[in-house]
């Protein structure tokens, strides 16, 4: 068989199966019964969910994708016939196993760490910033006195002579904030508003070269660009060249900064930047984030690595804004907590007032600023809430009106350290009508002309873009001069949790719609796997002279669509939730391909559904492996015999495939799970005997239930089934670790919790049950688990009885259903004997750890923080980490506690513009791992903290699970799949392949011969017991020899570039060794053959 055929089958099959599996599996929800259709949440007829519209739209998009995938799949099936020829020609195989050998888990070697690699964590945090946000929180009283016209601030005064020597430079920056879907769908917004804004922009900016405008969301801009003629396109390019029109940030969206994983943040940045570079030759240099609800230093780092020098933020706690204003610290260099030098510094401007709309951007008095929002002139659709309307500017009033606004400009400038002032002029979806362009630009130009022609006013006012402002600011602050002391302070830390007024903390949205937050993470994992497999398949296919057989362009278009859909999701919780049944593998299929999406060799337990309990599984080398057969349950106590779950350990090469054969025969390596079901007399549960499994009925009792593996013994309550205690066998210590469930209500005040805000009615109340829950205990050779069936959730704790990483932590999962509740939120709380005081640690975007302090001077809701992948508490002897496979809100309100808000059902709007509560709840699955680690370091206050290597790997396992795929080849699978092992060996433990993403061709919408290899070197803490962690990798001080990286592939070139591929360093050249510092994320342009 010709190699090209094999490559086609390989590339197409893998790619299709990954994407198709994604589509099928997104909504599987981890339910027990494979065939039971999911009950959907109901929604009152009169209250059409805005989110539902978005979901419907995305469903249509995905349905189209689905159709394309089906067509490709059919072509693959046709081609697969010719695979049979290839089976007879093993010499045609191009992949080899490299140095990957089939080890038994018991033969693993323990991890070796280069002592040099441990120094980073111990040095980190020693570099003092001028401002550390943990200290700011410590000193702020968080009171809220009436500040006068600037309600949340203070009275600002000035001396009129202050600008005599150096005039005030004012940049009025017109902008329009376009949400890609909020109250309307993306397409409706585009049709009704966005396209008109951009069409008018082209016309109106050309009328006067003093006019400026800027734009940030490329999702909208690219859609508009695709529909305009070449004349308009040329005009846009001219406007950009002349500096009248600027693209700021240039990501696919303006992302949320609390919930997204850094993979998705990078992905949407690359998507936007690549589109801009290819289409317009534009490279944005300033960041603009006016609407995210709180700000993360992870986003700051990603912008800096993309080549940005400046950024702007807006939604920061009003008390922090006020304090920064009093200290003139609203402009600062934002540095990463862990930075040992100043390489991560980026100049940041924080807007001082309540909002980014016109009333809150010209100065401290919104009543006056509103009079200079000329869209609100009498007769229009919007007016000023302060009941004093704007006046059109004419010769009779220009002097008085110029004085009024100059007074605001001067007062605002007193909050900053230079005489350069930024005055944004815009709001949501502004400038959609031609008349508004005229109203704003003509009236402001009259004011500017008057001010600039009166030297005694000592002001120069003009329209500007964001970069115009930052250029002038850098000049005024002497930042262009080498070795000059900066007038701006250095700040480290983050800006969560955001409050815009009173005790209105935006900590609700950290959890809101958790169903979609979980699906987002699954989608990211599948997209990343598809990207890497596609890039490798593309290279392999080019080795053949019949490359045309591999449908690379079609697949690339699908990948682009998937990237863009994921990008849109980072702005809004909208991803399709269509219900699909489990696909049950019948033995006609016979082959299971298991893909390892991590860059280290991996032992992992795989579970799949089959249609018979008689099963034999053969490893890639043809040896039988141990299989646990578990029941699939119809309800709590009855086994369904339509399907069975089989679980077995797979051993996979890094980024490679293992092919396992499934046979329907009785087998000595097959072990059936046993069951104990605990019931109480009051809940009328009947346990039926079973023809296949041994099921024993027990009574709920005060006796504990125990599970055990070689790392730990775990105790559960015989009444509730919930976790009570863990004994770690390494040191023989018992740890009191108690699982609890709790409810939050909402306050009885007028302002209540909603989609954004969390306003609880006090501390959480315990979850009370009248009858003990039914408890189902599974005992098996691969895993054992305890499942408790409560009214609102099914809670499972699973202990894997395997050597290596999966056996070292407990897997926790919940299926939550609060659709019948009224204004309640459900939390999972872990209470332990860890002496953590009021300190806890949460991750930011899966990239870095931010220490937190629970403060009694703040309301409860202020102490909730976003958790993307993990949170932990610790004392001198132990660290307890909760790893999460979805973003949720987390806190530690008492010493030894970690608490996660799992779902929220709220009946009212919280007056932040959405216009509805949260009533579209779905049955939601969540997934966690609980890891206990012995540490030997005193717990001290520090601005920085790092996970251990074991913790990093555990996080990688839960967020990048192995991907099982079935193949339909009747005569076996192509040999090329059997031996697919693209790396020569495991990458270092602290190195993570963020992505291997094929770059788009400059000529068309297909792929180029280059890919972006994105690597992250993780910072880790060595002060943990590493005995028996059994990680299959070592550390190498961040160095990797390029020629030793890939197996049977030659690296033609590897050239460092900026994170989003916009900039190449001046000395960019082909490198033979990768050398990265801890915490760095680097992108390389790679050519493989």
Image: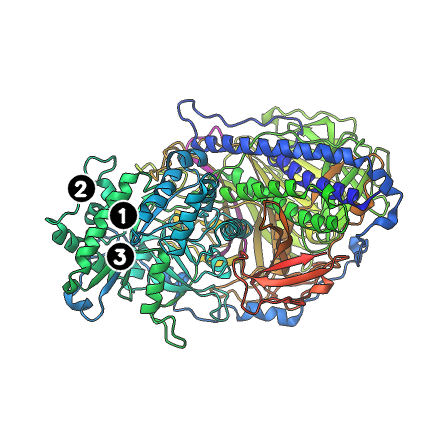
* Most foreground residue, 1029 or 291: 291
| Quarter assignment of residue 813 | top right
Query: Mark 2 and mark 1 in contact (Cβ < 8 Å)?
Result: no
Label 1 neighbour load within 10 Å: few <14, some 14-19, many 20+: many
Q: Position of residue 766 (x, y in %)?
A: 48, 39
Mark 1 secondary-structure assignment: helix
Mark 3 secondary-structure assignment: strand
Among the two numbered marks 3 and 2 on one chain, the one whose residue lies closer to the N terminus: 2
Residue that numbered label 1 is attached to: 358
Residue at coordinates 73% horizontally, 34% vertically from top-left?
75
Position of 751 compared to 1068: left or right?
Answer: left
Residue that numbered label 3 is attached to: 462
Q: Position of residue 443 (x, y in %)?
A: 21, 48
Q: Estimate the spatial distance between the alpha carbons at disc 3 and disc 2, rounded to whole Å.
A: 23 Å
| Residue 188 visible within the image | yes
Query: Mark 1 and mark 3 in contact (Cβ < 8 Å)?
Result: no
Residue at coordinates 50% horizontally, 67% vertically from top-left?
339
Query: Of the numbered discs in the image, which one, if any, rests on residue 389?
Result: 2
Mark 2 secondary-structure assignment: loop
Q: Which residues are magenta?
A: 819-847
Q: Nearer the viewer, mark 3 or mark 1?
A: 3
Q: Within the magenta stretch, is there residue 827?
A: yes
* Most foreground residue, 800 or 413: 413
Residue at coordinates 40% horizontally, 38% vertically from top-left?
195
Q: Nearer the viewer, mark 3 or mark 2?
A: 3
| Quadrant of the rendering where the C terminus is positioned | bottom right
């Amino acid at each position: 068989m010709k190699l090209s055929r094999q490559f086609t089958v390989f590339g197409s099959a893998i790619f299709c199966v990954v994407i198709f599996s994604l589509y099928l599996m997104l909504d599987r929800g981890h339910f027990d019964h494979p065939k039971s259709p999911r009950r959907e949440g109901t929604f009152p007829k009169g209250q059409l969910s805005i989110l539902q519209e978005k979901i419907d739209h995305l469903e249509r998009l995905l349905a189209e994708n689905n159709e394309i995938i089906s067509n490709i799949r059919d072509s693959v099936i046709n081609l697969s016939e010719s695979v049979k020829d290839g089976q007879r020609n093993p010499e045609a195989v191009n992949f080899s196993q490299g140095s990957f050998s089939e080890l038994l888990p018991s033969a693993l070697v323990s991890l070796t760490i280069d002592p040099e690699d441990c120094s980073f964590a111990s040095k980190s945090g020693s570099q003092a910033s001028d401002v550390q946000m943990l200290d700011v929180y410590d000193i702020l009283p968080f009171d809220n006195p009436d500040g006068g016209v600037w309600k949340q601030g203070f009275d600002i005064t000035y001396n009129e002579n202050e600008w005599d020597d150096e005039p005030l430079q004012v940049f009025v920056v017109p902008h329009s904030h376009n949400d890609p879907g909020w109250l309307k769908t993306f397409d409706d917004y585009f049709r009704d508003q966005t396209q008109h804004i951009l069409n008018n922009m082209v016309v109106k900016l050309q009328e006067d070269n003093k006019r400026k405008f800027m734009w940030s969301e490329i999702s909208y801009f690219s859609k508009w660009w695709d529909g305009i003629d070449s004349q308009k396109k040329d005009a846009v390019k001219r406007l950009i060249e002349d500096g009248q029109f600027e693209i700021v940030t240039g990501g696919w969206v303006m992302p949320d900064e609390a919930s997204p994983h850094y993979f998705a943040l990078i992905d949407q940045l690359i998507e936007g930047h690549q589109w801009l570079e290819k289409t317009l030759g534009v490279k944005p240099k300033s960041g603009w984030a006016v609407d995210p609800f709180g700000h993360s230093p992870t986003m700051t780092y990603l912008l800096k690595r993309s080549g940005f020098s400046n950024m702007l933020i807006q939604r920061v706690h009003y008390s922090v804004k006020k304090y920064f204003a009093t200290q003139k610290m609203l402009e600062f260099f934002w540095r990463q907590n862990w930075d040992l030098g100043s390489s991560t510094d980026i100049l940041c401007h924080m807007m001082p007032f309540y909002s980014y709309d016109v009333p809150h951007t010209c100065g401290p008095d919104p009543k006056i600023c509103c009079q200079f929002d000329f869209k609100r002139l009498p007769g229009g659709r919007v007016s000023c809430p302060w009941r004093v309307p704007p006046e059109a500017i004419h010769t009779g009033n220009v002097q008085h009106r110029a004085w009024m606004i100059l007074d605001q400009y001067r007062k605002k400038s007193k909050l900053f350290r230079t005489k350069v002032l930024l005055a944004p002029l815009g709001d949501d979806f502004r400038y959609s009508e031609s008349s508004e362009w005229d109203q704003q630009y003509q009236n402001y130009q009259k004011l500017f002309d008057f001010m600039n022609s009166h030297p005694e006013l000592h002001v120069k006012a003009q329209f500007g873009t964001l970069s115009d402002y930052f250029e002038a600011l850098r000049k005024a602050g002497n930042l262009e001069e080498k070795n000059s002391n900066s007038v701006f302070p250095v700040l480290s830390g983050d800006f969560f949790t955001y409050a815009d007024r009173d005790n209105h903390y935006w900590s609700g949205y950290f959890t809101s719609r958790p169903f979609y937050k979980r699906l987002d993470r699954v989608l990211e994992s599948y997209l990343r796997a598809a990207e890497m497999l596609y890039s490798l398949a593309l290279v392999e296919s080019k080795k053949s002279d019949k490359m045309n057989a591999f449908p690379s362009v079609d697949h690339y278009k699908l990948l682009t669509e998937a990237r863009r859909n994921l990008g849109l999701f980072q702005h809004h919780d909208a991803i399709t939730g269509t219900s699909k049944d489990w696909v049950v593998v019948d033995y006609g299929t016979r082959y299971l391909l298991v893909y390892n999406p991590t860059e280290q060799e991996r032992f992992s337990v795989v579970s799949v559904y089959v249609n018979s309990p008689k099963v034999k599984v053969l490893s890639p080398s043809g040896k039988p492996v141990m299989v646990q057969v578990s029941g699939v349950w119809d309800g709590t106590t009855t086994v369904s015999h339509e399907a069975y779950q089989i679980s077995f350990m797979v051993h996979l090469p890094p980024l490679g495939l293992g092919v396992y054969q499934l046979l329907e025969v009785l087998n000595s390596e097959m072990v059936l799970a046993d069951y104990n079901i605990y019931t109480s007399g009051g809940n009328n549960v009947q346990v039926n005997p079973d023809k296949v499994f041994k099921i024993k009925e027990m009574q709920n009792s005060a006796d504990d239930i125990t599970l055990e593996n070689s790392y730990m013994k775990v105790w559960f309550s015989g009444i509730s089934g919930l976790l009570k205690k863990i004994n770690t066998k390494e040191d023989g210590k018992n740890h009191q670790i108690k699982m609890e469930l709790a409810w939050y209500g909402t306050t009885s005040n007028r302002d209540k919790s909603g989609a954004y805000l969390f306003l609880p009615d006090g501390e959480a109340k315990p979850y009370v049950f009248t009858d003990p829950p039914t408890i189902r205990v599974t005992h098996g050779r691969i895993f054992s688990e305890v499942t408790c069936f409560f009214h609102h959730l099914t809670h499972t704790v699973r202990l894997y009885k395997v050597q290596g990483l999966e056996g070292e932590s407990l897997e926790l999962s919940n299926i939550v259903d609060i659709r019948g509740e009224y204004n309640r939120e459900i939390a999972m709380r872990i209470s332990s004997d860890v002496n953590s005081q009021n300190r806890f640690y949460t991750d930011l975007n899966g990239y870095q750890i931010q220490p937190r302090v629970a403060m009694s001077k703040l309301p409860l809701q202020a102490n909730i923080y976003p958790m993307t992948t993990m949170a932990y508490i610790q004392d001198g002897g132990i660290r307890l980490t909760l790893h999460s496979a979805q973003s949720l809100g987390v806190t530690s309100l008492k010493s030894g506690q970690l608490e996660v808000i799992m779902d929220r059902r709220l009946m009212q709007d919280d007056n932040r513009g959405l216009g509805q509560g949260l009533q579209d709840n779905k049955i939601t699955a969540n997934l966690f791992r609980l890891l206990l680690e012995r540490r030997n370091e005193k717990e001290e206050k520090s601005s920085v903290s790092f996970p251990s290597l074991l913790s990093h790997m555990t996080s990688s396992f839960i967020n990048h699970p192995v991907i099982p795929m079935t193949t339909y080849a009747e005569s076996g699978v192509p040999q090329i799949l059997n031996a697919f092992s693209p790396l020569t060996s495991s990458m270092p433990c602290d190195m993570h392949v963020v992505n291997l993403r094929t770059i788009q061709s400059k000529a068309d919408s297909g792929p180029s011969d280059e890919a972006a290899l994105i690597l992250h070197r993780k910072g880790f803490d060595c002060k943990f017991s590493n005995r028996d962690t059994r990680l299959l990798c070592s550390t190498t001080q961040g160095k990797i020899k390029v020629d030793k990286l890939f197996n049977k592939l030659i690296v033609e070139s590897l050239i460092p570039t900026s994170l989003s591929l916009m900039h190449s360093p001046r000395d960019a050249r082909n490198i033979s060794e990768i050398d990265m510092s801890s915490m760095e994320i680097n992108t390389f342009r790679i050519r493989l053959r």
